[in-house]
Image: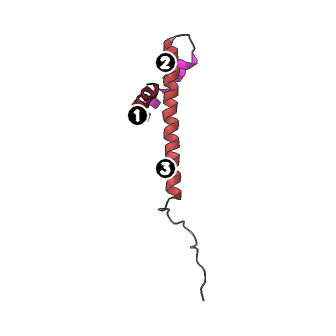
Amino acid sequence: MLESALNKLAERILSLDEASLTSLWGKYKNRMEHFEPSKDWEKAVIIFFIINAVRAKNHIFNEQLLRQSEVGPEKKPQKGKPDLRLVK
């Protein structure tokens, strides 16, 4: 039950736009930094970390795609001297 709920929550979070989330980052950072013992403050902390989680996930995802494209079979030839040997 708990895992299913978390899975559904993750699906909904993944459908959110990073740019829209990032525009809310400052609001929730400010709210989180001004502690008060309330449910609203607790929600602000969770939202702040969800926004950061999406940003971190996208950063890691983009780095991995870049790394794979550099290492993959479609690697572009480097400019400079070709790797040739003299054969007699």
- Examine the rendering and report whether any part of residue 26 can be seen: no
Looking at the rendered structure, the secondary structure element under dot 3 is helix
| Percent of width and height locating residue 7 | 43, 31
Tag 1–tag 2 contact (CB < 8 Å): no
| Percent of width and height locating residue 46 | 51, 22
| Percent of width and height locating residue 35 | 57, 14
Q: Which residue is painted at 51% across and 66% down in the image?
A: 77
Question: Mark 2 to mark 3: distance in Å?
Answer: 33 Å
Tag 2–tag 3 contact (CB < 8 Å): no
**N-terminal label among 1 and 2:** 1
From this view, report whether residue 27 is shown above or below residue 54: above
Q: Which residue is mark 1?
A: 17
* Number of residues whose C-alpha sits closer than 10 Å to that of mark 2, classed few (under 14), some (14–19) or many (20 or more): some
Q: Which residue is painted at 49% across and 44% down in the image?
A: 61
Q: Which quarter shows the N terminus?
A: top left
Picture quadrant where residue 20 is located: top left
> Please, what is the dominant secondary structure of the magenta stretch?
helix
Q: Given the image, on which type of amino acid does mark 3 rest? A: Leu
Tag 3–tag 1 contact (CB < 8 Å): no
Q: Which residue is painted at 46% across and 25% down in the image?
A: 2
Q: Residue furthest front?
A: 1
Question: Mark 1 to mark 2: distance in Å?
Answer: 19 Å
Q: Which residue is mark 3?
A: 65
Q: Give whichever of 78, 10 is nearer the camera.
A: 10
Residues shaded magenta: 13-36
Q: Which residue is mark 2?
A: 43
**N-terminal label among 2 and 3:** 2
